[in-house]
Image (tube, grey):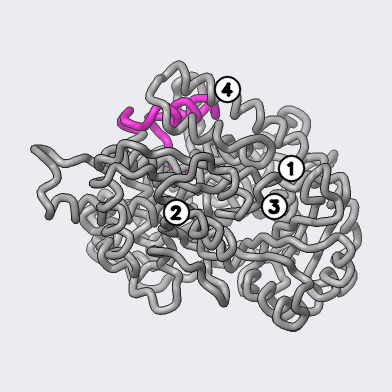
């Protein structure tokens, strides 16, 4: 049973102008924001690039490469963060004077993850310099292969390091031990943007630019998309980056590819918010890396031709629909596997089905994690031609650091896991199919050891009751653009009791309701997606909901987006 719990305020709001609704002031306080200075998302307030460790070495080498007209290859990743980071690197380096910049994205089924020996072997001819984006901190063998071919290597990454670091020429990663950068939350695209800022500063000092220097703010739409899509916590620094990127898109200055993807997702460029990036744009890019080749996504982000961008966006939308259909089938199979699971004491859940697609298992793990409120790892064969090896994707719950858990298993049973890496909440790994039963037991054991029983209780935090008469269009508009909302800075969620005056089914699974507030009799239009399972909603109910805007035929009105309902 899901528990609704009030999100507590961390202090007393002060200094807000009268134009900021009291409800919004309360919401900010519950997220640690007590005054207007803490939402001044101006680019001037970004942390300094010089605070990142490894920056001088990386900047010096890039300066040498630009002055020497080296061939530079950007080695990206096949998710949205990697694709946007690759586009930022290619566009940014060209702006700063690099003339021979190309990129390579690994195919997850052919090359594996990151800068692997297989990816290095595919680079013909060899570049003089490789710059990784969103990967590389664990690429010990891949970097060694590059060095053996005489290639210099700069790693930019944000993933947690393992016990051994690759032997690189320079590494920029805020999560390296002892790195002085105050925020550890940068996405891979954010790390690359910071490297470009530092590079521009050095080139400026050296008198490289004749006249106006390159404007790197043109890259912020890409930075915003990658940051939101990678689900990194939106601390102040990341909110500055995301807000600047959103403003750029809303003003019609976004790159052709992002604009086309926004339109393909049936969203409005003029009113775009962070959730639109996360739910409409990011998945279209991610689908290419999951099922096809992420080069399609990168090309969409690199083109300045509007018609070409729309063509790419249409292809990405078609792949995304294929991904959604495949995901639905796999999730249904996974749910059948765990029927009744909550009645036993399994804590760490591992699932494997030989017919599953390795590019979709992360989405399956995420869905099952949400349903079971347990850490879940879903596995599939490494490829259609390699059923002897498995690739797994892990998703965790608060309080259970999934990458550290995998490290603990690796330390106790060396060789069981062949490769792994990731974050606190998500990780990837590979192992032999014959070792799956042993790993499944080991994962459940470490989860039981490290997770307290109370953490297995699903909790939905809300901002409490919305006062009578407060569900107005004015407040809904303020909430929409008061963020940017996202990971660790969640969208406002309210919790009220209502009477269900009427309801009907939309499509086959969605509900549209008219809810009456018993305190003042006010009626509210509400919707809840994927909520109809053949039974009517309770006549008296408690609902957790977002206050959103319904834009129907150009007419805006407030609407409640229900996230959870239960009998009152």
Residue position for label 2: 151
Q: Earlier in the sequence, mark 3 or mark 1?
A: 3
Where does the magenta region start and end? 250-275
Q: In this rendering, which labeled residue sits more in front, label 3 or label 1? A: 3
Q: Earlier in the sequence, mark 1 or mark 4?
A: 4
Label placed on residue 362: 3
Residue position for label 4: 314
**Compared to 96, does 544 lie above or below?**
below
The answer to whether 114 appears left or right of 87 in the picture is right
Q: How dense is the environment of label 1, judged by Cα within 10 Å: few (below 14), some, or many (20 and up)? A: many
Q: Nearer the viewer, residue 114 or 216?
A: 114
Helix, strand or loop under label 3:
helix
**What is the spatial separation of the Cα atoms under label 2 and label 3, in whole angstroms?**
33 Å
Q: Earlier in the sequence, mark 2 or mark 3?
A: 2
Q: Is residue 466 visible?
A: no
**What is the spatial separation of the Cα atoms under label 1 and label 4, in whole angstroms?**
29 Å
**Compared to 29, does 441 lie above or below?**
below
Q: Residue furthest top?
A: 307
């Amino acid at each position: 049973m899901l528990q609704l719990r009030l999100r507590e305020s961390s202090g007393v709001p002060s200094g807000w102008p009268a134009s900021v609704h009291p409800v919004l002031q309360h919401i900010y306080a519950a997220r640690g924001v007590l005054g207007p200075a803490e939402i001044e998302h101006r680019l001037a307030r970004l942390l300094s690039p010089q605070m990142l460790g490894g920056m001088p070495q990386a900047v010096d080498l890039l300066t040498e490469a630009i002055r020497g007209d080296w061939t530079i290859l950007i080695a990206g990743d096949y998710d949205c963060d990697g694709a946007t980071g690759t586009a930022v690197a290619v566009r940014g380096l060209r702006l700063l004077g690099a003339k021979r910049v190309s990129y390579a994205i690994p195919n997850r089924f052919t090359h594996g993850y990151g800068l692997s020996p297989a990816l290095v072997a595919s680079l013909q001819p060899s570049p003089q310099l490789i710059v990784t984006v969103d990967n590389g901190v664990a690429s010990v063998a891949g970097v060694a292969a590059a060095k053996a071919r005489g290639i210099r290597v700069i790693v930019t990454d944000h993933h947690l390091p393992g016990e051994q670091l690759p032997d690189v020429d320079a590494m920029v990663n805020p999560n390296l031990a002892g790195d002085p950068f105050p925020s550890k939350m940068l996405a891979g695209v954010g790390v690359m943007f910071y490297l470009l800022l530092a590079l521009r500063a050095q080139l400026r000092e050296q008198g490289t630019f004749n006249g106006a220097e390159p404007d790197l703010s043109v890259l912020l739409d890409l930075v915003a998309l990658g940051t939101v899509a990678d689900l990194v916590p939106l601390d102040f620094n990341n909110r500055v980056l995301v807000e600047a990127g959103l403003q750029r898109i809303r003003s019609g200055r976004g790159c052709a590819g992002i604009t086309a993807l926004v339109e393909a997702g049936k969203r409005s460029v003029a009113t775009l918010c962070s959730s639109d990036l996360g739910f409409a744009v990011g998945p279209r890019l991610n689908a290419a890396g999951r099922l096809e080749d992420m080069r399609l996504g990168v090309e969409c982000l690199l083109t300045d031709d509007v018609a070409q961008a729309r063509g790419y966006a249409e292809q990405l939308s078609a792949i995304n629909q294929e991904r959604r259909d495949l995901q639905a089938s796999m999730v249904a199979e996974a749910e059948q596997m765990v029927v009744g699971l909550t009645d036993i004491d399994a804590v760490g859940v591992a699932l494997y089905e030989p017919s599953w697609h390795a590019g979709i298992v992360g989405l399956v793990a995420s869905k099952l994690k949400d349903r079971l409120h347990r850490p879940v790892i879903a596995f599939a064969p490494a490829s259609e031609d390699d059923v002897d090896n498995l690739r797994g994707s892990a998703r965790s719950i608060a309080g259970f650091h999934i990458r550290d858990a995998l490290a603990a298993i690796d330390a106790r049973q060396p060789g069981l896991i062949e490769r792994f890496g990731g974050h606190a909440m998500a990780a990837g790994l590979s192992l032999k199919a014959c070792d799956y039963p042993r790993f499944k037991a080991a994962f459940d054991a470490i989860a039981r050891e490290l997770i307290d029983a109370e953490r297995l209780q699903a909790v939905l935090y809300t901002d409490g009751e919305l006062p009578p008469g407060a569900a107005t269009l004015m407040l809904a508009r303020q909430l929409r653009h008061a963020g940017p909302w996202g990971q660790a800075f969640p969208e406002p969620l309210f919790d009220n009791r209502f009477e269900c005056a009427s309801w009907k089914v939309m499509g086959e699974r969605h509900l549209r309701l008219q809810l009456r507030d018993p305190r003042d009799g006010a009626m509210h239009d509400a919707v809840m997606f994927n909520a109809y399972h053949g039974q009517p909603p309770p006549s008296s109910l408690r609902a957790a909901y977002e206050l959103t805007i319904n834009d129907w035929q150009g007419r805006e009105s407030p609407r409640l987006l229900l996230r959870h309902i239960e009998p009152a």
